[in-house]
Image (tube, coloured by chain):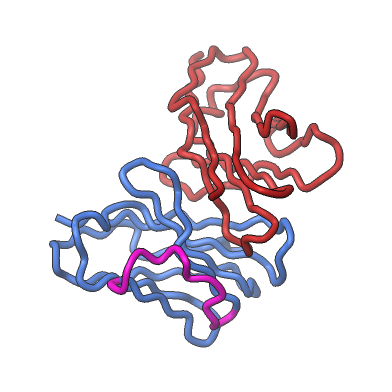
Chain colours: A red, B blue
């Protein structure tokens, strides 16, 4: 069965410092990979996705993610965090033979301190 | 363009009562999905509609849950009778026709509390 792991419940970072949110997955085949962000009282917002090709994917709000097939990881990164990046981040996968449904990780809360 | 909307935003009911959640997808989106997040855990898939047809309902927990999408527009998710373990946040999402890696657009969720 497929699974997604976000090993950190919370990540604390100072404003201006680099931000990394970790995600590893266990699925068969070559899945599509996604990152979503949830701000308070809002729905999940799409940040970026990996389909194929270049391992470094650029997304919204200055975020990027690096796909590593050998480590089955898809870590989310931002070179310089902003206080407004404080939110809940979810990694998700869509295995190739699983229809359209997404399998999510448990979420990582990011707190950026001024 | 209006996003995915969900109603109500919050619902508090007693065990054994019935609750109906509503989702209005983005206009023109054939795919509609229901997910839920229970007790701060991972978001789990419930089911997927393509227009008015149930494409995948493998995530529906039991027969107390009934989803409909009459006419292929808005969808309802009814829980009858509600149990304590049904508490959580129910998300609806929609996407354009087809599969592939199309992103799903999520609504703000309905927070359901069963007492």
Q: Position of residue A72 (x, y in %)?
A: 67, 34
Q: Nearer the viewer, residue A28 or B114?
A: A28
Give the quarter of the image for residue A80. top right
Task: Reply yes or no: does residue B52 show up in magenta.
Answer: yes
From the image, which quarter does the C terminus of chain B lie in?
A: bottom left
Q: Position of residue B45 (x, y in %)?
A: 48, 58
Task: Reply yes or no: does residue A11 show up in magenta.
Answer: no
Q: Nearer the viewer, residue A30 or A111?
A: A30
Residue shown at the point (25%, 60%) measured from the top left? B11
Residue shown at the point (56%, 28%) measured from the top left? A85
Residue shown at the point (48%, 25%) measured from the top left? A8
Give the quarter of the image for residue B29. bottom right
Q: Position of residue A17 (x, y in %)?
A: 62, 12
Q: Up-down: is B63 above or below B61?
A: below
Q: Position of residue B107 (x, y in %)?
A: 49, 57
Give the quarter of the image for residue B80. bottom left
**Chain part drawn in magenta:** B51-64
Q: Up-down: is A12 above or below B76?
A: above
The majority secondary structure of the magenta stretch comes to: loop
């Amino acid at each position: 069965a497929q699974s997604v792991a976000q090993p950190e419940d919370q990540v604390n970072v100072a404003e201006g410092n680099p931000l990394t949110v970790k995600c590893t997955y266990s699925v068969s085949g070559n899945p599509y990979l996604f990152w979503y962000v949830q701000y308070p009282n809002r729905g999940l917002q799409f940040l970026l996705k990996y389909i194929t090709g270049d391992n470094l994917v650029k997304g919204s709000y200055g975020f990027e993610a690096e796909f590593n097939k050998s480590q089955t990881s898809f870590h989310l990164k931002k070179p310089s965090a902003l206080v407004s990046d404080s939110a809940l981040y979810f990694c998700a996968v869509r295995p190739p033979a699983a229809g359209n449904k997404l399998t999510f990780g448990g979420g990582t809360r990011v707190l950026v301190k001024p | 363009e209006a996003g995915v909307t969900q109603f109500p935003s919050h619902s508090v009911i007693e065990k054994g009562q019935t609750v109906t959640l509503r989702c209005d997808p983005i206009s023109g989106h054939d795919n509609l999905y229901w997910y839920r997040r229970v007790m701060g855990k991972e978001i789990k898939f419930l089911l997927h509609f393509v227009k008015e047809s149930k494409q995948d309902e493998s995530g529906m927990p039991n027969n107390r849950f009934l989803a409909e999408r009459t006419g292929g527009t808005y969808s309802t998710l009814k829980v009858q009778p509600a149990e304590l373990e049904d508490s959580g946040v129910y998300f609806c999402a929609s996407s354009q026709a087809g599969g592939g890696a199309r992103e799903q657009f999520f609504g703000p969720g309905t927070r359901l509390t069963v007492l």
